[in-house]
Every structure is written in structure tokens, then in C-alpha cells.
């Protein structure tokens, strides 16, 4: 299971979410039971504070749910296993925000080199245009109602 948890962390990193976020989700998904922060921290050999921050992010994404046990005042977390809901309510909106941020950065970079006729500036503007075209395609794809319905 440790190898799968590590793989989940690496996968999350490739999506820019953070290694621990992926590790915690993978751990809870594979365990298929609610764990306390202390149990999560112990399993991953991290501090409770770090585990708490990552758990809060996962709750905000809709990937984890807080649960309580009657005899215990601690918070426990379990993985949400509704992947469609997770994609539509957590990951896709987060990706949309990142794409919107990328558009803003591309526009800012364009303004910085406007008026510069050097070959480097023209090359840079060409690369920015390519980046914007790719960003637009990805954005249109993930906002497409048919794609959303299929997910």
C-alpha cells in the first residue's frame, strides 16, 4: 500500500495539487475507513499540522469528508468515492482557476514586451501566442457541457 500512496502523491504533484494531498487521498481511499489526523500523520510520517492543512484542502475540493465518532471528539476523515462529483465540484473548478490565472499571466507578459521589436521579443510573443492557444483549447475542453456530462 505504501507504494500506491507514494504514487498517489506523485500523481497529485503533476497536477499541481501537492504531494501530501495525493498521499492522504490515496491512503484514505485504499483504507476505505475514516482515520483521525493522528492516524494519517503517523501513516505518512508527517506532522499533524501538515496533515491538517492537506486534509482541509481535500475537504475544500470535495475529495474528503469529515466524520465524527460518538465516543471520540477528534475529527476523522474519509475519502469521497464519487469520482464524478470530485471531478465536477473539485478538480475541474480548480483547473479552471489555474487556466484563468495563466491567461492573466500571458496577458501581463504580452504587455511587458509590447513595442519591443527585437527578435527575442518577437520570438517571446510567438511563444506566448502558442501558450494562449493551448490554454484556450484546454479551457474550452473542460468547460464543454458534453464533456462535463460524460465525466
Image (cartoon, grey):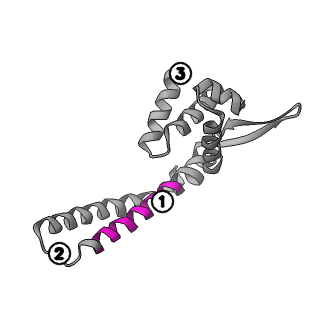
Q: Earlier in the sequence, mark 2 or mark 3?
A: 3
- Location of mark 2 (residue): 116
Whether residue 107 appears in magenta in the rendering, the answer is yes
The boundaries of the magenta stretch are 94-111
Circles 2 and 1, Cβ within 8 Å, touching? The answer is no
Q: Is 87 situated left or right of 7 in this image?
A: right
Whether residue 116 appears in magenta in the rendering, the answer is no
- Residue for point 53% across, 50% down: 91
Q: Earlier in the sequence, mark 1 or mark 3?
A: 3
Tell which of 115 and 134 is nearer to you.
115
- Location of mark 3 (residue): 2
User: Where residue 96 sits: x, y (%)?
Assistant: 48, 59
Instruction: Give the spatial CA distance, label 2 vs label 3.
Output: 53 Å
Instruction: Check the image and name the residue furthest to the bottom.
Output: 115
- Location of mark 1 (residue): 96
User: Where residue 50 sits: x, y (%)?
Assistant: 60, 38
Amino acid at each position: 500500500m505504501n507504494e500506491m500512496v507514494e504514487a498517489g502523491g506523485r500523481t497529485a504533484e503533476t497536477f499541481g495539487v501537492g504531494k501530501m494531498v495525493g498521499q492522504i487521498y490515496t491512503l484514505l481511499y485504499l483504507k476505505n475507513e475514516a482515520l483521525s489526523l493522528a492516524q494519517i500523520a503517523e501513516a505518512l510520517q508527517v506532522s499533524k499540522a501538515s496533515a491538517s492543512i492537506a486534509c482541509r484542502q481535500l475537504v475544500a475540493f470535495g475529495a474528503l469528508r469529515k466524520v465524527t465518532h460518538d465516543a471520540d471528539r477528534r475529527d476523522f476523515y474519509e475519502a469521497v468515492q464519487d469520482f464524478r462529483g470530485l471531478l465536477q465540484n473539485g478538480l475541474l473548478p480548480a483547473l479552471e482557476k489555474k487556466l484563468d490565472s495563466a491567461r492573466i499571466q500571458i496577458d501581463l507578459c504580452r504587455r511587458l514586451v509590447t513595442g519591443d521589436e527585437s527578435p527575442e521579443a518577437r520570438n517571446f510573443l510567438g511563444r506566448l501566442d502558442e501558450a494562449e492557444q493551448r490554454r484556450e483549447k484546454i479551457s474550452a475542453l473542460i468547460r464543454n457541457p458534453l464533456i462535463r456530462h460524460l465525466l
